[in-house]
Image (cartoon, rainbow, N blue to C red):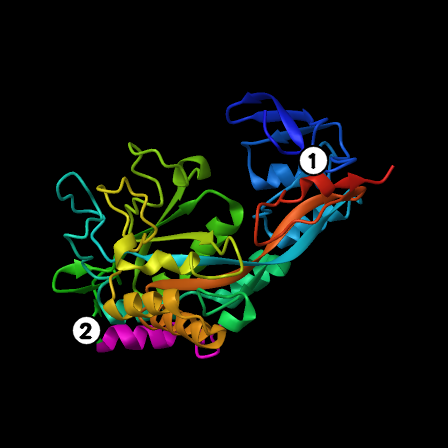
């Protein structure tokens, strides 16, 4: 059943889906392959090896793997990494609500405020303690560029007003000035509240390395960071009963990547609207995960919804980006390019603005 290039054959949940060529496909002589097999589960490194090292598979998407390892795997000569432009950004979110206090059966409720992340000084210090350049150079390589912006593509929407800085000494000065003083164990505290936070993300090597880079810098500044790594199948699920999903945000800070599904940023920037806050009432399906509320941002967004002049509209989105960065709602780390592992005989053209297999009907392989 269906109008796509392949017809459904069978599906094993969490493992494998198989399809066969659709003889009635609307494009003549398409698709070029008789069958397709897509395997899920596992991890990004295993997927990379299956294409670049063993040759078991022809294609693997979303290569969230350290670039150093990908380069070594490419030396096997069976495949290569295809890099393409996208609007994805690996970023750290700061919780505006209290993840440790439960109100009406809900943690991270908008009826609470975070005990210390609502302090602008703490947010500013954390922003100074993220070594974006180290993450770029030693983790992502070709697949990520250090950035100060949450909105990084297309070029007309990219702000030139922002900068990033890694400066532990300056972070210490900011915290000192805000009267966050080191305790006997070196962890800063103020009014009985200690700067101890839980930093969660999905399990994969680049993100765990990113966590360690941030943890080490925070330790030098007197902030205690507990690292939490959640299986991706859990972290990104919509299971209402699971406390470890990223939309519930039951931690102080968290990291993941999201981006534009199309070149226009309208849908992407909805994630900071007050009306989009994830909560128990909307089954945590709201896009505003940080629970940040700002009337100025809402006004800019709604003005962009009705603006037809492309230059003025781009200026509104740049202003939105700048406000999010100024308020340290999130800490952008790297602007990620798309990265896929492709077997050398295969000709495929993944896009950063759509599904990786948007034009699967055109893929072919050399004999």
Q: Is residue 148 above or below residue 55?
A: below
The alpha-carbon separation of the residues under discs 1 and 2 comes to: 68 Å
- Identify whether 203 is placed above or below 323: above
- In the foreground, 38 or 8: 8
Q: Is residue 172 magenta?
A: yes
**Left or right position of 322 against 296:** right
Quadrant of the drawing holding the C terminus: top right
Residue 230 to residue 260: above or below: above
> Which residue: 21% across, 42% down?
281
- Position of residue 225 relative to residue 120, above or below, is above
Coordinates of residue 103 in the picture (x, y in percent): 13, 44
Image location (x, y in percent) of residue 79: 76, 44
For residue 262: magenta? no
Mark 1 or 2 closer to N-term?
Answer: 1
Q: For this view, does 34 lie left or right of residue 150?
A: right
SS of the residue at dot 2? Answer: loop
Write down the residue under mark 1. Answer: 26
Residue 125 in sight here = no
The region drawn magenta spans 158-177
Taking the spot 59% from the left edge, 48% from the top edge, the residue there is 65
Residue that appears at 52% across and 47% down: 205
Residue 179 is tagged as 2
Q: Position of residue 189 (x, y in %)?
A: 19, 63
Q: Is residue 113 visible?
A: yes
């Amino acid at each position: 059943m269906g109008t796509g290039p392949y017809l459904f054959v069978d599906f094993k949940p969490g493992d494998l889906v198989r399809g066969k060529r659709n003889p009635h496909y609307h494009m003549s002589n398409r698709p070029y392959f008789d069958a397709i097999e897509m395997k899920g589960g596992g991890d990004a490194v295993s997927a990379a090896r299956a294409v670049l090292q063993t040759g078991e598979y022809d294609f693997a998407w979303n290569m969230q793997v350290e670039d150093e390892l990908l380069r070594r795997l490419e030396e096997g000569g069976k495949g290569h990494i295809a890099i393409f432009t996208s609007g994805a950004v690996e970023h750290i979110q700061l919780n505006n609500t209290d993840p440790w206090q439960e109100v009406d059966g809900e943690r991270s409720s908008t009826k609470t405020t975070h005990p210390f992340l609502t302090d602008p000084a703490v947010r500013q210090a954390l922003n100074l303690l993220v070594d974006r350049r180290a993450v770029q150079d030693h983790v992502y390589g070709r697949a990520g560029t250090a950035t100060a912006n949450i909105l990084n593509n297309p070029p007309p929407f990219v702000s030139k007003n922002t900068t990033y800085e890694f400066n532990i000494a300056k972070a210490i000065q900011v915290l000192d000035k805000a009267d966050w003083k080191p305790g006997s164990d070196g962890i800063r505290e103020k009014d009985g509240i200690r700067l101890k936070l839980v930093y969660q993300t999905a399990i994969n090597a680049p993100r765990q390395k990113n966590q360690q880079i941030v943890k080490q810098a925070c330790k030098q500044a007197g902030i205690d960071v507990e690292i939490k790594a959640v299986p991706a199948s859990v972290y990104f699920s919509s299971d209402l009963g699971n406390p470890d999903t990223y939309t519930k945000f039951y931690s102080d800070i968290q990291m993941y990547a999201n981006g534009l599904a199309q070149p226009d940023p309208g849908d992407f920037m909805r994630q900071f609207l007050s009306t989009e806050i994830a909560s128990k009432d909307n089954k945590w399906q709201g896009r505003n995960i940080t629970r940040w509320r700002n009337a100025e941002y809402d006004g800019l967004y709604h003005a962009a919804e009705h603006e037809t002049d492309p230059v003025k509209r781009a200026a509104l989105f740049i202003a939105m980006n700048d406000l999010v960065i100024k308020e340290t709602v999130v800490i952008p780390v790297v602007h990620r390019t798309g990265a896929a592992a492709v077997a050398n005989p295969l000709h495929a053209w993944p896009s950063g603005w759509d599904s990786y297999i948007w034009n699967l009907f055109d893929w072919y392989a050399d004999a």
